[in-house]
Image: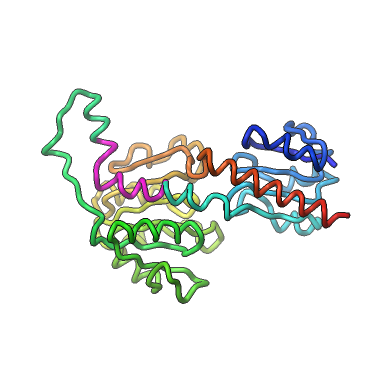
């Protein structure tokens, strides 16, 4: 059996997977692969699936499977899975770090100091204590964010189409979350329904001066509408680790005011790469056991 590692993982993962088959890291060998393992970079499209006649199993190391043509894979009787349990803490910590950094003006303070400026009066701060955090989605990552927010004395509210009650947050309708939250952290999968859900219309419902943190998917946001709202002050800040296109060449967010941007670092902790490896090995092992 050939196992194709299409993206970069922990250095020891190829060796660990050799117990189950021949491990390759060259997409030129996709035709030989029975298992393909990806992260965010490689998109498993219809063309790739058609180029892999032996393919039986696709694993995405990470949260969500929107980088995989799941319906087409399933039509070919190819199993698809991900590793949502691995990345929760890593992504939650980045989301919360961004939420701390924005009102503290950490990025502009650092940049101005290195430019020889002393903006002690200009860079005012606000606190998280007593503020309301709204979560869109109440899955694993959102619940980890909620734990951290409560430790900072924040009220936590949330909307999730599929969850009525949660110990992590006070559940309510989406418009109520928009109207009450001082901070909005996005934790929804990318679907036809959620694509572009943060747009001029939804921003108009939001509490003026809200700050948004997006560590889920760039396509849930209409970037031009967010940039416009930042310019008018309807939004006080936007922090993102994900973008409509990656890298976000030409994105209006790159020149918009009051942004805090990162190059999709959410899952890129040393600890998470170890967890990803453990989850992937477990899934390959279970696949091999089931095939016998």
Residue 140: image x %, image y %?
51, 59
Residue 244: image x %, image y %?
49, 46
Task: Tell me the quarter of the image containing the C terminus.
Answer: bottom right
Magenta stretch?
A: 94-108
Q: Residue at x 80, y 40 (%)?
A: 19
Q: Residue at x 33, y 43 (%)?
A: 259
Residue 131 occupies quadrant: bottom left
User: Left or right: 37 with respect to 2?
Assistant: left
Q: Magenta stretch mostly in which secondary structure?
A: helix
Q: Residue at x 36, y 70 (%)?
A: 175
Count numbered badges in the picture. 0
Q: Which of 244 and 150 is in front in this view?
A: 150
- From what the image shows, is residue 172 above or below residue 133? below
Residue 202 occupies quadrant: bottom left
Outermost residue on the right side: it is 292
Outermost residue on the bottom side: it is 164
Task: Tell me the quarter of the image containing the N terminus.
Answer: top right
Residue 109: image x %, image y %?
23, 35
Residue 145: image x %, image y %?
41, 56
User: Left or right: 213 with respect to 273?
Assistant: left
Q: Which colour assignment does the render follow?
A: rainbow
Q: Which residue is drawn at 30% across and 67% down?
A: 179
Decide whether residue 21 is among the magenta residues: no
Decide whether residue 98 is among the magenta residues: yes
Outermost residue on the left side: it is 121
User: Left or right: 207 with respect to 169?
Assistant: left
């Amino acid at each position: 059996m050939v196992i194709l590692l299409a993206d970069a993982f922990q250095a020891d993962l190829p060796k660990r997977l050799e117990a189950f088959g021949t491990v390759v890291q060259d997409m030129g060998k996709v035709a030989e692969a029975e298992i393909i393992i990806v992260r965010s970079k490689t998109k498993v499209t219809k063309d790739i699936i058609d180029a892999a006649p032996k393919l039986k199993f696709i694993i995405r190391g990470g949260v969500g499977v929107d980088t995989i043509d799941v319906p087409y894979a399933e039509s070919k009787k190819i199993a698809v899975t991900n590793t949502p349990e691995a990345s929760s803490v890593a992504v939650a910590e980045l989301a919360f770090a961004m939420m701390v950094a924005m009102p503290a003006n950490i990025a502009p303070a650092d940049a101005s100091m290195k430019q020889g400026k002393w903006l002690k009066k200009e860079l005012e701060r606000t606190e998280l204590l007593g503020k309301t955090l709204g979560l869109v989605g109440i899955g694993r990552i959102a619940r980890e964010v909620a734990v951290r927010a409560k430790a900072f004395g924040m009220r936590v509210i949330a909307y999730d189409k599929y969850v009525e009650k949660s110990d992590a947050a006070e559940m309510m309708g989406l418009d109520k979350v928009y109207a009450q939250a001082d901070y909005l952290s996005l934790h929804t999968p990318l679907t036809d329904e959620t694509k572009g859900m943060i747009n001029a219309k939804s921003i108009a419902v939001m509490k003026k001066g809200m700050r948004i943190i997006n560590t889920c998917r760039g396509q849930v946001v209409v970037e031009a509408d967010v940039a416009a709202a930042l310019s008018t002050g309807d939004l006080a800040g936007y922090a993102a680790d994900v973008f409509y296109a990656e890298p976000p060449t030409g994105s209006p967010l790159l020149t918009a005011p009051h942004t805090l941007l990162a190059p999709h670092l959410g899952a890129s902790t040393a600890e998470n790469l170890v967890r990803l490896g453990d989850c992937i090995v477990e899934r390959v092992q279970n696949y091999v056991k089931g095939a016998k």
